[in-house]
Amino acid sequence: MVSGEETISNEEMKSGNIVNLFLKFAFPTVVGVVIAGIQEIIDGFFIGNAIGS
């Protein structure tokens, strides 16, 4: 096991609080999607300016 990484045990997945488990998985996913969306918007500005000139 790699030190410094937080892993979720099999037992926690079976009997843990569903709200906490949902947040542990949903929060990083939402952050990733927001970052990808921001990158797409910025990329669109650069490509729009390159095509428009």
Image (cartoon, grey):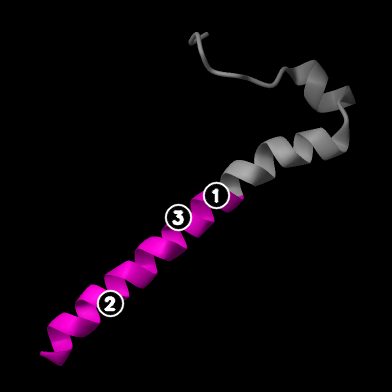
> On the image, numbered disc 2 is attached to which residue?
45
Quarter that holds the C terminus:
bottom left
Q: Where is residue 7 in the image (x, y as percent from the top left)?
A: 63, 19
For the magenta stretch, what is the residue range?
A: 30-53
**SS of the residue under disc 1:** helix
Task: Find out whether the residues at labels 1 and 3 contact each other: C-beta distance under 8 Å.
Answer: yes
> On the image, numbered disc 3 is attached to which residue?
35
Instruction: Say which quarter of the image contains residue 52.
Output: bottom left
Near-viewer residue (32 or 1) = 32
Magenta-drawn stretch contains 12: no
> On the image, numbered disc 1 is attached to which residue?
31
Amino acid carrying mark 3 in the image: Ile
Amino acid carrying mark 1 in the image: Val
Magenta-drawn stretch contains 49: yes
Q: In whole angstroms, how far apart are the C-alphas of marks 2 and 3?
A: 16 Å
Instruction: Say which quarter of the image contains residue 24.
Output: top right
**SS of the residue under disc 2:** helix
Near-viewer residue (30 or 15) = 30
Q: Which residue is drawn at 51% across and 13% down?
A: 4
